Image: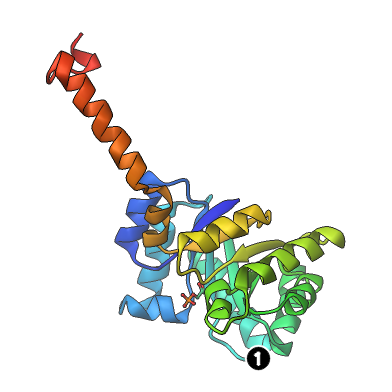
Amino acid sequence: MLFLLDTADIEAIRHCNEFYPIAGVTTNPTIATKEKKDFWELARGIRKVIGDEKMLHIQTVQKTADKMVEEALLLKKEVGGNFYVKIPICEEGLKATKELKKLGIGVTITAIFTAPQALIAAKAGADFVAPYVNRLDNIIGDGTEVVSQIVEQLDHYKIDCKVLAASFRNAEQVHKCATFGCHSVTVTPKILNTIITHPMTDNALLDFDRDWKAVYGDKTILDF
Ligand code: G3P
């Protein structure tokens, strides 16, 4: 399962890119506007930090297929590298996706809340479909169950489209997606850190330090 970062905070991206095995970054208009920066400064800044090989998914703000295609081509030109335009699921979005696939542009269809939405998006040619887990859980919609259905259907029909599960509030939701064989998730830096943190791990490290110091004091292996 690939881990992507769902943020446009350049410093957080720089930190996570250094310490975690992230495969890329996703943004949406809400995430981008939180940074209160010039849009191109932000988009190019993220690309500079993660390099050309990692995925960068940026959402279009257009409403018609023609304009979505135009914006996607501009984003690809300006941001470059391994790029995917995020397009919300809707008729215009499906039309734009079919066109963009002919032009060789990566597409992630987003704001997915049901398996049938994902199936149609995948049939239109989306490279990724992004179901919103926590927003479904908030309305007792069982977000991870929807992810499981999408993974199963894409596999059943052998459609070349991956699930990029999004909208997480906790590590348990991410873990459940992994148990269903979800291809990728996009999470906040905070959730990424929560995933690797455990009080029993902290206790184990304290024990190791105490036992080592009791015999060797401040010496490390480098000092022998
Ligand atoms: O990228 C879209 C998705 O991650 C939204 O998350 O937390 O606003 O529900 P959230």
Q: Position of residue 67 (x, y in %)?
A: 62, 87
Instruction: Tell me the residue that label 1 is attached to.
Output: 64
- Residue located 51% across and 60% down the image: 172
Q: Secondary structure at mark 1?
A: loop
Q: Residue furthest bottom?
A: 63
Tell me what residue is drawn at x 52 percent, y 52 percent: 23
**The CB of the residue at mark 1 lies under 8 Å from ligand 1:** no
**Residue 107 in sight:** no
Amino acid type for the residue under numbered disc 1: Thr
Split into 4 quadrants, where in the image is the C terminus? top left
Q: Residue at x 62, y 67 (%)?
A: 144
Q: Is 24 rendered above or below residue 103?
A: above
Q: Quadrant of residue 131?
A: bottom right
Camera-side residue of 191 and 137: 137
Q: Quadrant of residue 48?
A: bottom left
Q: Is residue 111 left or right of residue 167?
A: right
Colour scheme of the picture? rainbow
Q: Is residue 56 above or below residue 40?
A: above
Task: Where is residue 106? Give x, y as percent.
Answer: 66, 65
Q: How many badges with numbers are in the image?
A: 1
Q: Nearer the viewer, residue 145 or 192?
A: 145
The answer to which of 105 and 108 lies nearer the viewer is 108
In the drawing, does residue 84 fall left or right of residue 200? right
Residue 151, percent from left and from top:
73, 62
Q: Is residue 150 left or right of residue 27?
A: right
Q: Give x and y (percent) for residue 165.
A: 59, 66
Residue in the picture at 15% in, 19% down: 214
